[in-house]
Image (cartoon, rainbow, N blue to C red):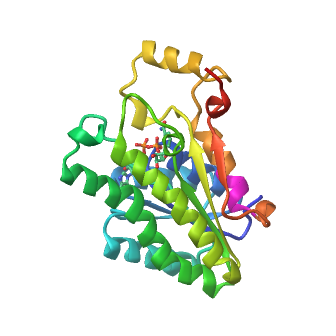
């Protein structure tokens, strides 16, 4: 019960890393505010938590919409009385139109930034005051390995949004430290989730061979890192980036 007594607001809770994090955190004693734009998927996550004896509340919200995020925070506080953990996981990767800058249109750029970057801003804007009210808490942001390296197949809006998220994390870590709030970011490598359903077996095999540990990450691999950063076990860690990529980043050519 590493999160006993905590309340966590988790965005993108309906599937992939978000759902795995919800289930793990609930199993470790946290109450969950499961926020997602996809009502059916988010409600299914809540159902799975309750089925296993946990407590959870669904909050439908598009993280790009400040008012909807504000309402999700209010839903969580109304249901469980407080918030301790803000887990900014919702993100989009639109491979068909998020490409290199010379072929990127403005609406794609703006939408990706609105979800991947501004979404976290709104959650923090409305969630941090709730963390402060009860003496502090933990912010865990989900970045990406793409924030740290270039790829020949570019997804520049996604990459830039994740890089900005890392900068924002460092700034919030310093500004809100006095309030007992820690902020850290996880940079996953390739994770086997619905986001990557475009990969056929041949691609999955090629990626697995590229990864030093020889496989794709599971959503749980990322959730366990999140658990550490959200729990009091990491009480002296703030402003840090943790790379969870099976060794890709340290691999030489
Ligand atoms: N899968 C990977 O290989 C990978 C690698 C690096 C980083 N990441 C990051 O991990 C996080 C989770 O990715 P995943 O693979 O689980 O994704 P996923 O696509 O499998 O799930 C994303 C969830 O976010 C929700 N969502 C999408 N837009 C939203 C919005 N505007 N408001 C609220 N909810 C929204 C979706 O409905 C879905 O439930 C993302 O931030 C992603 O960028 C993923």
Q: Is 205 a magenta residue? A: no
Q: Residue at x 32, y 61 (%)?
A: 114
Residue 27 lies, in percent from the top left, at: 68, 53
Majority SS type along the magenta span: helix
Q: Is residue 13 visible?
A: no
Q: Quadrant of residue 12?
A: bottom left
78 vs 62: above or below: below
Q: Nearer the viewer, residue 50 or 151?
A: 151
Q: Is 39 on the left or on the right of 184, as rendered?
A: left
Name the image quarter holding residue 178.
bottom right
Where's the N terminus, which quadrant?
A: bottom right
Q: Is residue 116 visible?
A: yes
The quarter of the picture where the C terminus appears is: top right
Q: Quadrant of residue 141?
A: bottom right
Front in this rendered view, residue 166 or 32: 166
Q: Position of residue 68 (x, y in %)?
A: 33, 72
Magenta stretch: includes residue 229: yes
What residue lies at 39% left-to-right and 29% top-to-bottom?
A: 197
Magenta range is: 226-231
Q: Which residue does the image show at 64% across and 40% down from the upper left?
A: 244
């Amino acid at each position: 019960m590493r999160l006993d007594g905590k309340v966590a607001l988790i965005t993108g809770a309906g599937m992939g890393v978000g759902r795995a994090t919800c289930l793990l955190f609930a199993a470790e004693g946290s109450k969950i505010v499961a926020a997602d734009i996809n009502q059916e998927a988010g409600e299914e996550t809540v159902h799975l938590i309750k089925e296993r004896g946990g407590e959870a509340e669904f909050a439908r919200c598009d993280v790009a919409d400040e008012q909807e995020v504000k309402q999700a925070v209010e839903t969580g506080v109304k249901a469980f009385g407080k918030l301790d953990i803000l887990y900014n996981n919702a993100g989009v990767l639109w491979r068909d139109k998020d490409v290199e800058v010379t072929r990127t249109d403005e609406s794609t750029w703006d939408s990706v930034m609105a979800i991947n970057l501004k979404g976290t801003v709104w959650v923090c804007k409305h969630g941090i005051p709730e963390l402060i009210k009860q003496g502090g808490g933990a912010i865990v942001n989900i970045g990406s390995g793409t924030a740290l390296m270039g790829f020949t197949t570019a997804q520049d809006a996604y990459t830039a949004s994740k890089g900005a998220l890392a900068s924002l994390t460092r700034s919030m870590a310093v500004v809100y430290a006095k309030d007992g709030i820690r902020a850290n970011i996880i940079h996953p490598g390739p994770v086997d989730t619905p986001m990557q359903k475009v990969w056929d077996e041949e691609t999955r095999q090629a990626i697995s061979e590229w990864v030093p540990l020889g496989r794709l990450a599971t959503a749980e691999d990322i959730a366990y890192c999140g658990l550490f950063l959200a729990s009091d076990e990491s009480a002296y860690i703030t402003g840090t980036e943790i790379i969870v990529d099976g060794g890709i980043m340290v691999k030489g050519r």
